[in-house]
Amino acid sequence: MESKLKPASEERDAPIAELRDASKHYGAVVAAEGLNLAIRRGEFLSFLGPSGCGKTTALRMLAGFESPTSGDILLDGQRVNDVPPHQRPVNMVFQHYALFPHLTVAQNIAYGLRQRRPRPPEDEISRAVERALETVRLPGFGPRRIWEMSGGQQQRVALARAIVNQPKLLLLDEPMAALDKKLRRDMQIELQTLQRQLGITFILVTHDQEEALSMSDRICIMRSGRIVQVGSPRELYDRPASRYVADFVGKSNFFPGTVTAVSAGRTELAAAGGHVIAGLAPVGIAAGQRASASLRPEQIALTRKPAGHALPVTVVNRIFLGEHTEYLVRNGDLGEFLVLVSRQAEASEGGFEPGDQAFASWSEGAALILEDD
Amino acid sequence: MQRQALRTWLFLAPAGAWFLCMLVLPLIVVFVYSFGERGAAGGYAPAFTFDNFLNLGSRWAAFKNTLILAPLGTLICLLIAYPLAYFLALKTSPRWRTVLLILVIVPFWTSILIRSYAWIYLLGGQGIPALLNALGLGNPRLINTPFAVLVGIVYGYLPLMVFPIYVALERLDKRLLEASSDLGSPPWRSFLQVTLPLSMPGVATGCMLVFILLMGEFLIPAMLGGGKVFFIGNALVDLFLQSRNWPFGSAVAVALVLVMLITVLAYMRFTRRWAGGRDDVSLM
């Protein structure tokens, strides 16, 4: 809103927040190391990784609860390393909500507005609170006590308490962890809608890849305190830069081997038993190097008769997933791997039973050749 | 259902019998006695008169001392205990916390009688006054003054105030303070808006414990007040054991019980308000 009169170009394109070579060490323990990330205005960004990967540390540095041991944190171009949380235009939805038990729902939501100096008039505060309650679809719940609310409702209150302040960044620390699966799904959709509607930059921390994939504009994948790859969900899924990312984002089969030939757009890898698997190497890789070929289960087809480059396999197990069926198959050389067969494909081939002999194939050059890590 | 009820009664019986014999019956006796007359040789003679209650004014000094020094002692205990409990609960590493908590309890390992004797010497002519005199700061009289009684009271009852407040602060969810900070509140305002209100049940419990016990206190005034600073407890000892005027003593006791009852009721209202009608918040 402040940029209405200014030339849109520079202001809008400048990142809303930045981590510049930010590291956080606790004595000998490295929580985050050399984080570099520019957060775009209005995007929905997720930090994704297993517990202890540094994603929460990154979030807490943005909130101001931790200051980096080295490097800088920038908010709207300003270095904020030493700015305490209460002076940052950033709000957080805490993992277990951290709602004030001695205050009503309305008082919880009004808390941030009441800290402003000069303090806004009461009628303005109550209007803003009522609007926030409507935004999170809890109209009229203001006078309730916190413990009278269900887990899902408490989460909405926590959300309202943060968005009512119109922060530059809304930080969400595993906000769905305490909700059951169905509720989580609903809340994910709602959060996404809300983010579009408000235009506030959302930063989510999660270890749930499905959640990150379904909600985010961009995902920042972390591992042992470092950023591994940043990209849109599709980029990460289609072009993972490493085996770790391919494994973390979606399911994948990995066939380890040695790189035999490298040319533009095509890399060949000799896997166990001399099987040559060709594909793309997103990150530069040299002939002779150890690597893995990654193939998504849905890239592999399962047929009764050999078709071209087909591997003979034995069906080991099958899991019915509704629209798809997931087969675990075994090849004498390459071992076990997963194949995802659509209902349509299954209709033409007929279903496979454990113990059946079949042939697995994929389109030539479809694999990704990834460095082991 | 029958067996369940029987079992419940069985479990409650010992405590119930104790409660009945040691509290309810004596209270009834005291209540009945308070309307009686002093026997010719002391003790109790049956009668029905309000004279004992009308005569309460003659013991006004004891009531006045108690009603001033008990609240004042409670307040001073609170003012010392809160920062201490806050420091222990929020600012101390777990290892030091244990050590310091033990230090708070250690005085309880010695009888209050012996510890009060120590204060007689400390506050007496050869103690602190002599020290102040040597430093050229005058030679104040400390022992046998309300001040001495107050010192003894605060010293003796401080741990009872520290612990409930400590427990309340220790149980405080520290993430609430982060949330408060995140929402724009500087630390001192977070203290006033989050820490203090959420520790009020502990404050109320500590105040009630100390205040109720102080209302009935008689040892510390007797020793450090030297018979000059009289509490209701001392008046009761005097009336029952020295002048053997049991009915008047009973009237004083009934008045004391009433004051305590009012205090407890006020406390219960207060904690219920802070807990916002919630019944899963214990009083400690």
Image (tube, grey):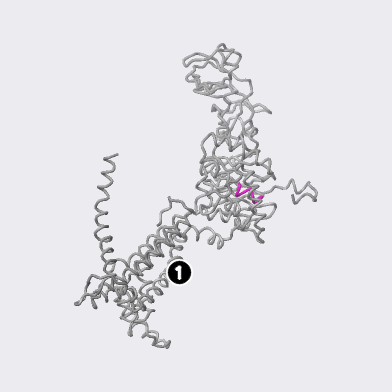
**Residue found at the very far left of the displayed protein:** B41
Which residue is more in the foreground, B167 or A329?
A: B167
Which residue is more in the foreground, B241 or B130?
A: B241
Query: Would residue A101 appear left or right of A13 to someone viewing this image?
Result: left
Query: Would residue B84 appear left or right of B45 to someone viewing this image?
Result: right
Q: Can you give x and y, in whole percent of width and height, for residue A212 in the image?
A: 59, 37
**Residue found at the very far front of the displayed protein:** B48
**Quarter of image, res B183:** bottom right
User: Can the viewer see residue A317 in this picture?
Assistant: yes
Residue drawn 19% across the image and 77% down it:
B41
Numbered range of the magenta stretch: A160-166
Which residue is more in the foreground, A115 or A9?
A: A115
Query: Would residue B153 appear left or right of A363 to someone viewing this image?
Result: left
Q: Can you give x and y, in whole percent of width and height, for residue A131 in the image?
A: 65, 47
In the image, residue A164 lies in the stretch drawn in magenta: yes
Q: Can you give x and y, in whole percent of width and height, for residue B245 in the image?
A: 25, 75
**Residue found at the very far top of the displayed protein:** A305
Compared with A204, B146 (above or below) is: below
Residue drawn 59% across the image and 31% down it:
A370
Could you say whether the residue bearing mark 1 is in a helix, strand or loop? helix
Q: Quadrant of the C terminus of chain A?
A: top right
Q: Check the residue under mark 1 and report the chain it is in.
A: B
The local crowd at label 1, few if under 14, some if 14 to 19, many if 20 or more residues have their Cα within 10 Å, is few
Which residue is more in the foreground, A204 or B49?
A: B49
Compared with A158, A339 (above or below) is: above
**Quarter of image, res A137:** top right
Residue drawn 40% across the image and 56% down it:
B283
Disc 1 residue type? Leu
Compared with A37, A360 (above or below) is: above
- Residue under pointer 1: B79
In the image, residue B44 lies in the stretch drawn in magenta: no
Query: Would residue B232 appear left or right of A167 to someone viewing this image?
Result: left
